[in-house]
Image: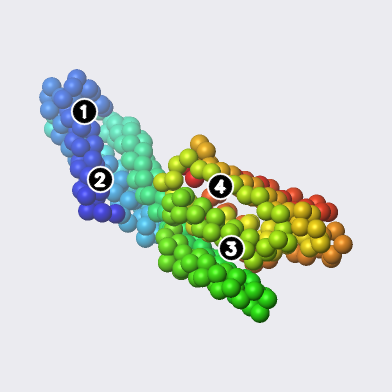
């Protein structure tokens, strides 16, 4: 707790007790024969409020944190009961002395009967303030434990996100090098151009995407470059249709969330002889602060089914869960001759 919050809390407690005292001692209240006209109520309530505060704060600063929270329940209840009875006996004795002094009662009445009545009324208020102190500290400890749990969970998620994001670079690097490798020898000029574009994309991954969130414009520009790079690599073997449209370029989004789905489409495209049978459709748009990605690619029904996605897709699913819990929807359809992804992310 910061010093400012501590000071505010102390002042708030002092105001509470001051208002409590003023309310009782400045009106026409009477209690057990004490009244403000004779001044007996002010005297009795002065030490009575002190005892109430003592029982309250002994719970807050000692009994709850050192005994109850540390599972020393028997000691806690023994000390609480001992203090409660001791303070009640002491206050009841003082009340009787004040009653005699201010002639609220006289010596001829039954002191046992009056003392019992005073004790019962005092112990009621003492139990009330003891319970308040207990609940106050218990709730404080509960909130602190919950905050610590949330911080630990947050740190765990951040560590996991860093690990997942670190996996993207080697995964992307592997795919890029593999693409250039297959072009070398068959089309060296295209291999050079592809390598140049690949280095630009890798630079984005290593440096520009290091932030937790980047502008939507940068992320979609990266995606566009990636699509063009894959289009060069695939050449005339596929039929590619894509569109990217957005309204709010300055919106922020976690980097490298969309690319794995597009990469998956190029990786698992069908291999028919006719290019028109090997189609990839990509549509990305943003409106009303929501990003919608639709990716559909044909697959081969004659080939053995492969595990679509691999490291990249499993990775991004986990990142979506951590970064946008209950703020995204992901629907994947795997049919006999096509594979389709529909993703919506609320980035508001």
Q: Measuring from the top left, give residue 32's x and y in whole percent.
A: 26, 27
**Mark closer to the observer (1, 2):** 2
Give the secondary structure at mark 1: helix
**Total marks in image:** 4
Q: Earlier in the sequence, mark 4 or mark 3?
A: 3
Residue 197 x, y percent position in the rendering: 52, 67
**Distance between the Cα atoms at labels 3 and 1?**
81 Å
Residue at numbered disc 1: 24
State whether residue 212 appears in this view.
Answer: yes
Q: Nearer the viewer, residue 233 or 296?
A: 233
Question: Could you tell me how far apart the alpha carbons at marks 1 and 2 are, in whole angstroms?
Answer: 23 Å
Per the model, the C-alpha gap separating discs 2 and 3 is 61 Å
Name the residue beneath numbered marker 4. Answer: 244
Going from N to C along the chain, the mark reached first, 2 or 3, is: 2
With 220 as the anchor, is 51 left or right in this view?
Answer: left
Other-residue count near label 3 (Cα within 10 Å), few / some / many at <14 / 14–19 / ≥20: many
Foreground residue, 198 or 135?
Answer: 198
Residue beneath disc 3: 229
Task: For mark 3, give the secondary structure.
Answer: helix
Contact flag, marks 2 and 4 (Cβ < 8 Å)? no
Numbered disc in front, either 2 or 3 = 3
Marks 2 and 4 sit apart, C-alpha to C-alpha, by 54 Å
The answer to whether residue 97 of the structure is visible from this angle is no
At 79% across and 54% down in the image, what residue appears? 277
Spatial separation of the CA atoms under disc 4 and disc 3: 16 Å
Task: Determine crowd level at label 4: few under 14, some 14-19, many 20+ residues with C-alpha closer than 10 A.
Answer: some
Q: Circle 2 is placed at which residue position?
A: 9
Sequence-first disc among 3 and 1: 1
């Amino acid at each position: 707790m910061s010093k400012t919050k501590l000071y505010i809390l102390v002042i708030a407690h002092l105001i509470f007790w001051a208002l409590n005292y003023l309310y009782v001692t400045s009106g026409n209240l009477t209690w057990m024969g004490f009244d403000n006209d004779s001044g007996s109520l002010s005297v009795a309530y002065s030490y009575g409020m002190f005892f109430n505060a003592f029982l309250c704060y002994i719970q807050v600063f000692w009994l709850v944190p050192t005994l109850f929270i540390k599972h020393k329940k028997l000691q806690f209840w023994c000390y609480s009961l001992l203090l409660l009875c001791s303070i009640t006996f002491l206050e009841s004795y003082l009340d009787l002395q004040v009653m005699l002094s201010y002639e609220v009662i006289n010596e001829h009445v039954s002191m046992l009967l009056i003392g019992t009545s005073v004790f019962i009324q005092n112990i009621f208020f003492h139990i009330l303030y003891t319970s308040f102190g207990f609940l106050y500290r218990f709730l404080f400890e509960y909130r602190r434990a919950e905050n610590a749990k949330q911080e630990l969970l947050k740190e765990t998620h951040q560590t996991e996100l860093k690990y997942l994001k670190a996996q993207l670079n080697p995964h992307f690097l592997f795919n890029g090098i593999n693409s250039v490798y297959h072009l070398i020898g068959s089309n060296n000029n295209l291999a050079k151009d592809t390598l140049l574009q690949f280095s630009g994309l890798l630079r984005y991954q290593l440096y520009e995407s290091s932030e937790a969130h980047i502008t939507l414009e940068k992320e979609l520009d990266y995606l566009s470059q990636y699509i063009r790079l894959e289009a060069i690599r695939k050449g005339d073997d596929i039929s590619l249709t894509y569109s990217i449209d957005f309204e709010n370029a300055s919106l922020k989004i976690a980097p490298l969330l969309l690319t794995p789905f597009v990469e998956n489409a190029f990786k698992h495209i069908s291999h028919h002889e006719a290019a028109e049978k090997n189609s990839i459709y990509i549509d990305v748009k943003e409106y009303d602060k929501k990003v919608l990605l639709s990716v559909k690619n044909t697959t081969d029904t004659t080939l053995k089914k492969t595990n679509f996605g691999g490291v990249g897709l499993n990775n991004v699913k986990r990142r979506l869960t951590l970064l946008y819990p209950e703020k995204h929807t992901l629907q994947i359809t795997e049919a006999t001759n096509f594979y389709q992804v529909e993703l919506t992310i609320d980035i508001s």
